[in-house]
Amino acid sequence: MKFLVTVKRVTDYEAKIKLKADKSGIVTDGVNMIMNPFDEIGVEEALRQREKHGGEVVIVSIGTSDSTDKIRSALAMGADRGILVKHDGPLDSFAVARVLAKIVDKEKPDVVLMGKQAIDDDSNQAAQMLAELLGWGQATFANIVTLEGGRATVVREADGGLETVSTTLPAVVTTDLRLNEPRYAALPGIMKAKKKPLEEVEIGSLGVDIAAKVKTIAYEEPPAKKAGQKVADVASLVTRLKTEAKVI
Amino acid sequence: MTSVSLSSFDLAVPTEEHKMLRDQVRAFARDEVEPQALEHDRHERFNRRLFEKVGELGLLGVTVTEKDGGAGMDATAAVIVHEELSACDPGFALAYLAHSMLCVNNLAVNATDEQKRRWLPKLLTGEAIGAMGMSEPAVGTDVLGLRTTAKKDGDHWVVNGRKMWITNGAVDDERTPCDVMLFYARTGGSDARPEITSFVVQRGTPGFGVGQKIHDKAGMRGSNTAEMVLEDARVPADNLVGEQGGAIKCMMRNLALERVTLAAMSLGIARRSIEVMVSYANDRKAFGKPLNEFGQIQRHIAESYAEYMACRAYVYDTARRMPLDAYGNRLDSDGVKLVASTMGKVVADRAMQVLGGYGYVGEYVVERLWRDAKLLEIGGGTIEAHQKNMTRDLTRGPFPWA
């Protein structure tokens, strides 16, 4: 079974995020960059499924050559080979989906595993768009993935509980936080990673329209949280929730 | 001619592999090492299960060649692992050092293939715990004065003596000895020119045991320290490591790596202390403004950072130039430990000062780092020993810049 796992290089969740002066984006100079944690769960899931079913785990990332080290991290965890689609600059989710569709055409995986969202822009769109472009089934927010008899049965995290869905393969699956706990790359894996194949593809060579359909106007910081207030008892809490906060 | 881009070269992560290693060990230290550190310090207990996890990551054989089952990395990689582990738990890092540097690396460099096959596999997984026995109750810095003797008797050596301050010597509080102890003993010669040989003694050898586990250490309490006893211990002749009488070179070579990795531990302590004091000075207010707006606090922060960065450059540069299988660079391996150990202690002390009362209690981490930091001025060579050795090397010359 062949798994294609997407990996995005994103700002560290522990980093303090600052906006650029012109509000066109966030400052990334000097900020630690990590593999999107949901993608890391995707890599882990592919490795575990490969242990059960055999096959190949291919990592794909879109970005500058800086993204190479995140692909290598996935290879160090145990993935077989990597593809870097070289591109410098922002891409909206739809452009990402179109680029990935092209890679899927070429690689013909049985399962595309993606993080449910990237923790930088939190769009949560590319996987759904990719499934639509490919005409494949999709299962998002996976909590348990079972691959059997040409089908993917996925227990997914939905509002208010768990839901089980099933789709034929090939399919697109996105990972939620509790699907697994990614392994650390062991030292022998790190030493082997450099010897594994990593193909670089210029985005222009794919013949895909990557023009933005979504225009970013400005980035703004969320409003600062106001200090909390203490209330004397439950009755006054309820009153103030009704009259001041107007939430009940 | 190949050109090296100096502006993009990073001493502390010279290659992609080093970067991945640092990222992985940092994540592991944050998620697995940090949460257990305070508890194990408090109870003076070595975390055996965590040690096995370190084995699963392949870190116990960081400097061992791939042929011998290790990762085949260099001294820089060893420094990275020690710095990252120490940023969370120097006590645990010290147990790692005693095992991986003093025992495993020494065997990987000096033992025969047959010996390596016997000892390394279990040491590399963490199933077996390794230690190194050099210091004795009455002999530390003056190592050539060691009193432990080994006398040949048929196909055995009969060993008598005691080894003191042995990290990992005991594996628990029940005086269970480590699985493998590499140790040095006199096999002949005179007091002026002793013949010194290294051997391995294994748990279960009659006459080999733990004299006492050392209690009430100020710091480094996440590692066990013990006095080891060899009393008519019969060590098989094929446990002799290297040549009879040839241990001094092996010892000196291995101690150079020990000093550099101990210096790396001080780097970890200092870096963490700086993070803690900067964050606290940012959050805590006095007289209506954050502490970091006070000149006295600024001095603590700025001097700590500058001294840390200076030591970091010296340690990583020395590691970069350090071969693992040749006679090491004594001047600079002494030099890095001399400056980094005191720097680590001073920076931890400044962090405690910035935190005030909070710094003095365990929950805020620097209190533990402050206690741990002191050992590095004593263990693996006192700073006075470094001063003595360095002055001797510099007196004999030539200067390294000549």
Image: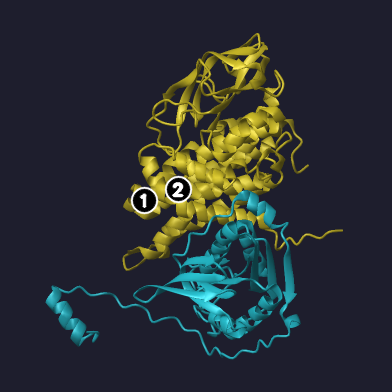
Residue B372 at least partly seen = yes
Within the image, what quadrant is residue B400 found in?
A: top right
Q: Which residue is mark 1?
A: B359
State the hue of chain A.
cyan
Residue sitting at 35 percent across and 38 percent down?
A: B43
Find the distance from the CA under tag 1 to the CA under tag 2: 10 Å
Please tell me which residue lies in front, A149 or B102. A149
Q: Position of residue A97 (x, y in %)?
A: 61, 82
Given the image, on which type of amino acid does mark 2 rest? Ala
Q: Is residue A153 above or below residue B218?
A: below
Within the image, what quadrant is residue B289 found in?
A: bottom left
Q: Which residue is mark 2?
A: B348
Residue sitting at 87 percent across and 58 percent down?
A: B1
Q: Position of residue A100 (x, y in %)?
A: 64, 78
- In the picture, one chain is yellow; tell me its letter: B
The first of marks 1 and 2 along the sequence is 2
Please tell me which residue lies in front, A86 or B266. A86
